[in-house]
Image (cartoon, rainbow, N blue to C red):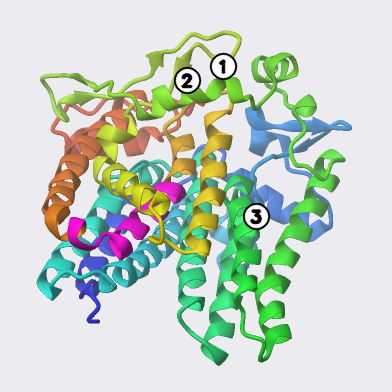
Amino acid sequence: MTSPRLLPVALVLSALIWIIATAGGRQIFIKEVLGDAFDSQAEHFLRGNVDVDGEAIRWEAMVVNGKARMYFGPFPALLRIPLNLIYPAGRGAWSRISGFLAGEIALFAFTGLISNAVRRSSLSVRTRNWLAAACLIGFVFGTPLLLLLGNLSIYNEAIIWALAWTLGALFFAIRSRNTEGHAQTVSLTAFSLCAAGALLSRVTFGAPLVLIAPMLAIHLPRENRWRQFAALFLPLGAGLGFYLLLSYARFGSFVGVSIDHYINPVHREFAHKYGMFSLQRVPYGLADYFGLRFPSLQWQAPFLKADRHFFAHPHLYSIPFSETYLSIPWGASWLLAGAILGVICLVRRNCADLFEHGAAVAFALQGLGILSFYTLSQRYSVDLYPFLIFCLLVFLRRGGVLLARIYHVIIGLVLVSITVNSLATVSWLVDSDQNVRPETRAIWTRFLGRSSPGATSESN
């Protein structure tokens, strides 16, 4: 079947990603909040240790035996090594270049996923083009990707890389199931590399891919099976081994972060008493991330006011408010609708295969993990999106007659999500996000036609 023509749309969106990430192309080498911690980590890697300079990581430090460590995934730090060798003057200011590269990988991986899914539908060529293009635009402007690109502080840089590598891994996983021989080996290798990248960016994104890898191995052909196994497991195994060894070197534990060393007393003491993860939080997390609370209106642009909201459950969450300024039903209604229909396809008899069921469960476990976490934030909701995206892909492939009847509804929901999410995200970046650089906030303020406030000092 004919694939939709998405390259022109993807190229235009690439340019827009650059504009968003660099605040109109005027801020490329900018020191984002704690962004130089990745540069410091890279330098310590080259010296043969896992420390990080205390003045670089500051309030997010984990102090072990009197030395500062960081809990963020190491991939952005590993990326800094060649970047600083090529252009040493860029030290400490690579966050936006890094975020742009991650955004491009995420965009083109999603392009491939949507193209493959829609191509297998029964829609006409013209309808495929319209639906696929709408989904692509919705991915950039109707998901938290817009937030990650608009604020590439240390908190968001690791997440956008994790999302990008996850989508890349998913693309190559699906591709490997539709190819054979050398092409399949290449796809399995690419999946393994992307999965390792996701694991080293943010472990919550990499863990589902570790579970998906054996599902791919089950259906490998007997011919050249050992070569296929090597392609599938060697890069991922190396990434997993590096992650475990790094965790042990940092905190003396293979399981990851040890909250005992965190210098933030509020989070540390709360986690000691109630735990970082608890299934008791899941209903409250669902209510926060999937509730129908709408941002308040305001007269000045961008007309929606995004802010933190009171969410006091002292035995469940370490702080009495949530930073989820826009719930998924408003910010990504198109994706949520498609995901719900995808779940229906998954539970129907003979509508989905074993791999699709297994991958959906793996991504659902990732979502369950973030729903049980001890804080709530818009950026944390990104952990829910691999599951939503995968279920959308299932619906686009398996939706049949229903897809042909309601595709225009999905396109309409894309328009709603783009409008609401864009306005709310700009409001958050301008008025509420404490990690946006003053110079960047001033550019957004001028873009909205407001009077530009004086620059203020950097804060957390």
Task: Decide which of 97, 331 is in the foreground and name it.
Answer: 331
**Is residue 388 located in the magenta-colored stretch of the structure?**
yes
Task: Decide which of 329, 319 is in the foreground and name it.
Answer: 329
**Is residue 401 located in the magenta-colored stretch of the structure?**
yes
Which secondary structure, mark 1?
A: loop
- Mark 3 nearby-residue class (10 Å; few <14, some 14–19, many ≥20): many
| Residue type (three-letter) at the residue carrying disc 2 | Tyr
Residue identifier under label 1? 317
| Residue type (three-letter) at the residue carrying disc 1 | Tyr
As drawn, the label of residue 284 is: 2
* Residue 42 rendering spot, x and y as whole percentages: 69, 55
- Mark 1 nearby-residue class (10 Å; few <14, some 14–19, many ≥20): many
Which secondary structure, mark 3?
A: helix
Which residue is drawn at the image coordinates 39% and 47% (left, top)? 388
Q: Which residues are magenta?
A: 386-402
The answer for how far apart the CA atoms under marks 3 and 2 are is: 29 Å
* Residue 275 rendering spot, x and y as whole percentages: 70, 22
